[in-house]
Image (cartoon, grey):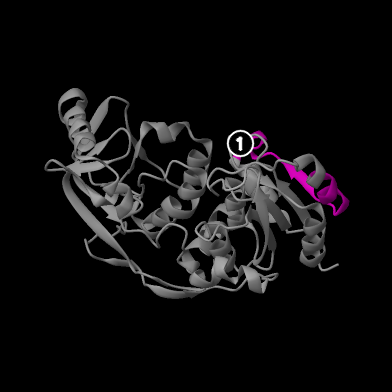
Amino acid sequence: MTSRTPTPTAGTILCEGQLSRRKAPVNLRAEDAVLFSHEMERDIPSTRLLELRDVWASADGFLFKGGRLLPESFAFPANRAQWKTRSVVKFLAGNYLLRRRRRLRRPAAWIIDDWSFGYFHWLADALSRLYTIRHLLGEMPLLLPRKYEGLEFVRSSLEAFGVREVEYIGEGEVVQCERLFVPTQTAPSGHYNEEVIRDIGEIVGAAYGDEAADDGRIYISRARAPKRRIVNEDEIIGALGEFGFRVVYAEEHSFAEQVRMARAARFLVSNHGAGLTNMIFMRPGGRVLELRHHTDRINNCYFTLASALGLDFYYQPCEPERPGEDAHTANLLVKDSELRANLELMLGQ
C-alpha cells in the first residue's frame, strides 16, 4: 500500500523559533562597532503554516480577498503601508474587473512576497519558505506568477529541490484559490533560521556543485550592475589579482555554474549586492569580505548571513563616489592600501 503525505494542517509549526547570536566581523574596529552592534543578537520566530481559503492571487504576485490586500503579500508591514488608498483601489478594480479569472480548485502552495523577484530575496527568503513545505509539494503545485518562469535561477533552484509541478499565473490573469497553503517567513528578511539556510546550501550544493572545496579565490564584480558599482575597480582588480583572486561576472554564468564556483571557493570578495548571496553555497569555515558604504548600519544581511552559515566575515568601509549619497544606490571608492591589508588578514598572510 502506497503511503501518503498527511493533509497539511493550518497552524502547524514548521520550524521552531530560535535565538540567533552573531559572530562579530573578524576585523572589527572599535570605531565601526555602531555598524553591527544592534545586529549581534536576534530572536527568530517560529514558522507556521497558514491556510488561506478563496483567496485571489494576481499576476504580479499579490494576494487579496474581500476588497483588501493581504499582509502575506509583503516582506514587511511597512511595504503595505506605502500603498495609498487610491493605489489599492486601482489595483483591486483592475484585478476584479479587467483581468481574466480562473478558479484553482486544487490546494496549492505560495512562498513569495513583494521582494521575492530579486536574486537575494528568492534564495534567502523564498527558498527558505519552500524548504519548510518541501514535503507537501508532491501532492500540490507551487503557485507563482508567470514572470518567475523567465528567471533561470528560479527554475534551477526549484529543480534542485525536486519541485515537480509549478502552476503559473498568466499575464492578464487572476487566480482564485480555494485552498492556498502559505508558510510564514522563516525569519524577517535579512535574518535567518540558521539550520534552514545551511540546509538550503547543502541541498542546492549537492545538486550542482558538490565536488571537493579548494583554495578558490573569487571576486564577484558589479561592473555591469546599474548601481552600487566600484568606481576604481580596475585598480582593485590589480590588487586582487596579486593575491590570486579571479574576477567573476555573475551575468556570464548560469545558476549551476555560480553554485559550483561558490561551493569550491574558500575566499569570496564583493561589494554589497546580489553576488554575495552566493556565500550560501560556500562550506563552513570559508571567508567573505564585503566592500560596503562607510555609514551603512541598515544593510547587514550579508554580515548576518555569513554568521548563520559559519563563515568568517570581514568588511571594508568605503566612501561613496558622491559625498552623502545613500548606501542603497552609491557607487563606492575602495582604498587600495586598506584592501591589501584586509586581504592579507583574510588569507592569513
Q: In x, y percent, where is residue 320?
A: 64, 47
Could you tell me which residue is drawn at 49 percent across and 44 percent down? 159
Q: In the orientation shown, which residue stands out farthest toward the left? A: 66
Could you tell me which residue is drawn at 42 percent across and 36 percent down? 148
Could you tell me which residue is drawn at 20 percent across and 35 percent down? 86
Q: In x, y percent, where is residue 206?
A: 60, 55
- 297 left or right of 347 in image: left
Element under label 1?
loop
Q: In x, y percent, where is residue 342?
A: 77, 62
Q: Which residues are magenta?
A: 237-254
Whether residue 137 can be seen here = yes
Residue hosting label 1 = 225
Is 252 situated above or below 240?
above
Estimate how packed mark 1 is, as few (under 14), some (14 to 19) or many (20 or more) residues with alpha carbons within 10 Å: few
- Residue 268: quadrant of the picture: bottom right
Give the position of the C terminus as an image quadrant: bottom right
Whether residue 73 can be seen here = no
Is 150 situated above or below 260?
above
Relative depth, front residue between 265 and 208: 265
Is 189 situated above or below 307?
above
Relative depth, front residue between 81 and 8: 81
- 275 left or right of 4 in image: right
Specify the amino acid type for callout 1: Ala
Q: In x, y percent, where is residue 146?
A: 37, 31
Could you tell me which residue is drawn at 30 percent across and 45 percent down? 82
Give the position of the N terminus as an image quadrant: bottom left
